[in-house]
Structures are given as structure tokens and as C-alpha cells.
Image (tube, rainbow, N blue to C red):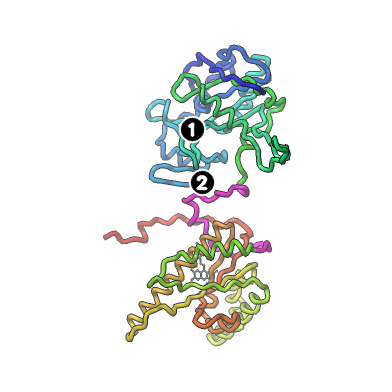
Amino acid sequence: MTGLTVTGVAGLPEIEPGADLGQLISDAAGDLRDGDIVVVTSKIVSKAEGRVVRADREQAIDAETVRVVARRGQTRIVETRHGLVLAAAGVDNSNTAPGTVVLLPEDPDGSARRLRKALGERRGVSVGVIITDTMGRPWRTGQTDAAIGVAGLAPLRDHRGQPDTFGNLLEVTVAAVADEIASAADLVKGKTTQLPAVVVRGLAGLVTGPDGPGAAALIRPAADDMFRLGAADVLAARRTVREFTAEPVDPAAVRRAIAAALTAPAPHHSEPWRFAVLESAQARTALLDDMLAAWTADLRGDGFTEEQIARRVRRGEPLRRAPLIIVPCLAAEAAHPYPDQRRSAAERTMFVVAMGAAVQNLLVALAVEGLGSCWVSSTLFCPQIAVRSLGLPSGWEPMGAIGVGHAAGPPSPRPPRDPERFLLTL
Ligand SMILES: Cc1cc2nc3c(=O)[nH]c(=O)nc-3n(C[C@H](O)[C@H](O)[C@H](O)COP(=O)(O)O)c2cc1C
């Protein structure tokens, strides 16, 4: 490839619902050859497919959204059901009648395949088709166009394993050629011109006989997404997980999460947080067995039957199933002494709530690392036993126990909570 041309398809009419885009582009495209790539803005595809709806823009965005990735003021970056992550779910109220909004095509890869077929039938040519939309980039100012629907074109060109000019093998380079072509096409299409389609010539090597995997291949799988949690998702990502897989927990991830715990607020500029990390199965089993014996003795003392006791102690089982246990501990030596009970109790409460803040940080940070957790009361009810079993340093007060591991399944949906029910406005 030594050069390419991008030529606007001039003379397309205003596209109405039900318009035959294949015919219109075929008639207007002029010279069209095998190996050309027809790039069409999604706006006219949506219009032809009747995806212009009379709706409130915010409600339309809600309907198109499967996940809010980030939000600032009125701006929402969301994932659509296509898997695209973009502002306002691609819902657009520019270039459409007042009171109406344009939604993205239902199935942009399907739209691209149909358009390709129509152009092939009408013009007897094998072309590639790209349907584009405009997207921002999180770490760069300004928008560019990207491919949301592709047919007859390899959307990615994998350079991995090929030598560079110095003979070093390329390790990570996979060129998103469909996006690159979409951007190049936008230089000619523009936003305000009457050129919603262009023909790109000079890249015939990318055009394929079969329709290929489509733009779906450009969507990064969730497991490879280093930024999976948007700012809006981070807190909600923490859920109590009671079933874990056997997959071990990365000690480095635990240390990063503990570092996050240590950023919690605490009284008197103190640092009252300590963590016993039970990496060995032996330490975990010893603690759980000792606590179980104490718990059972308590329940017998309460007069429960053996059956009732068996049922109750089953609640401690999430810790047994966890591949790692962390026992958060409070070291409150920085608490100020007071002669009276009222102020002593208040001082104690300050340190306990600071511990809660640290544990919440820890659990959220574990969730960001992809780890589930379950903070249970356990050691709070038998502190001496936990201190003895773990050999905790003097002054470390156990504050429950946290089972940590990879969640065995997705969490149950979190019921929405109305903040108004939880607040008093004064
Ligand atoms: C201090 C504390 C003690 C808890 N003790 C237990 C427990 O003993 N067993 C248990 O299954 N869950 C325990 N939980 C977890 C709660 O049940 C859980 O947070 C609640 O059901 C809300 O679910 P979520 O964490 O997924 O939002 C405890 C939570 C806290 C903060």
C-alpha cells in the first residue's frame, strides 16, 4: 500500500425511515471497484432503519444502557448492549428533528453485511463496508470516528510475532484498521457536510471474501479490560461473597488492597489499623476450629439444641470456603485516656469507626483487584481466642474476619436504595 484516496459520495438525499440505503449509495457512489471500502456514518443507517424516535434524550440513554461506566454531571459514559462504551449510549439529537433522537443501529454488523450484499448485487463488486460513530477517547482530548459495524474487512491486523525494522519481534501490536479507516473517512465526511458516506480506495488487501467477524471483534473482552470498573462502578463492585473458587489469591493484590485500607481517616492522626493475613491453611483451620469450639460452647450455654447449634454455626462456613482470611485488627494505643465513662466510650467509638473505614477501603480495593470478600463478625465475639490462636501482638484487637477469594458466581442484584429514606435534611 503506497497511498489511499477518500472520496465523498455526493448527492445522497435526506434519509427517511425505510430508505433503501443500498440502492441510494449504489446510485450515488460513482466509480466503485472491487477492494474499495464504503464507509457510512451510522446516523444515516439509523435513520433508514427507523431508529429515530420521539423520546426524551435521557430516557433514551437509559433504555440503551447496560452499564454506566462513568458519570460527571449530566455526562454519562455507558456501555450499550452492543458492548460499545461511549458517551450517552450513542444517542444523538443533532441533525434530527426537534423532539426526536437518533439511536445507534440495532445490529451495526448486520447493517454492514446487508449494505455490502446490496452493493455487491447492484454493482457487481466486492467491497468492504464500515459503519462509523464518533467517540471520545478517555485519555485524549477530542473525538474521532470508530467502526461500530464492519463487513467484508478484517477489522484488526495482527502484527504480533512479526519483526520490526531492527528484527525485534513485535509483541503487542494489533492494528485496529477498521477504526483507522473510520477516522480517515471522517476527515472527508465531516460532521456538518452533506457527505455521510465515502469510498476509501487503496486498501484492497484488507477486503475479504467472507463478511468476517465484524466490528464485534473490536470490543475488548471484559477479562482483558484493565479499566473495567468505571468511577461509577467502584463502590458498587464490593459485595459480600460467600462462595469462592479454589483459585489462590495473589499476595501482591492483597498488599495493594491493604495499602488502600491504610488511606482511611483516623482520629488524632493515628494509624490504628493492623491486618493478620492468614496465608497458611494451617493457621486458618486452627483459628476456625478454635472459634467454632467457643461458639458451640456459647450456644450450648444459651440452651440451644444440637440441631439448632449445627444450623447456626453453618453461618461461619464462608470463612472455611475462603482461600485466604484476613483478620483486621484495631490497635488503639493512640486513644486518649479520660477519667469518665462517657468520654472513654466516645474515644473508643472513634477508633472503631476508623477501623470500619479502613476495612471498607480494603474490601473495595479487593473488589477492584477482582477479589470477592466476606467480612464476618466471628473474632469480635471471641477476641481472646482469636488473639491466642493467631498469636497476635499485644494491643491488636481483632475486628471480625474477612474471607477473600475469587467469587464462585455473580452476586445477586443489589436492590436500589432511595437516599431520601436514609437522610434528614435540615
Ligand atoms: C461488621 C459486620 C459483620 C458481619 N457479619 C457477617 C456474618 O457474621 N455473616 C455473614 O454472612 N455476613 C456478615 N456480614 C455481611 C453482611 O451480611 C452484608 O454486608 C450484607 O448482607 C449486605 O450485603 P453486601 O455486603 O453484599 O452489600 C457482616 C458485615 C459487617 C459490616
Residue at the disc numbered 2: 67
Is residue 207 visible in the rendered image? The answer is yes
Magenta span includes 193 = no
Residue 204 appears at what percent x and percent y? Answer: 68, 22
Magenta span includes 245 = yes
| Farthest residue, direction front | 166
Q: Amino acid at mark 1?
A: Leu
Which secondary structure is most common in the magenta stretch? loop
Structural crowding at the residue carrying mark 1, measured as other residues with C-alpha within 10 Å and reported as few (<14), some (14–19) or many (≥20): many
- Taking depth in this image into account, of 228 and 97 the one nearest to the observer is 228
Residue at the disc numbered 1: 103
Residue at left offset 62%, top offset 68% = 324
Residue stretch in magenta: 222-248
Q: Quadrant of the N terminus?
A: top right
Q: Quadrant of the C terminus?
A: bottom left
Q: Earlier in the sequence, mark 1 or mark 2?
A: 2
Residue at left offset 53%, top offset 41% = 85
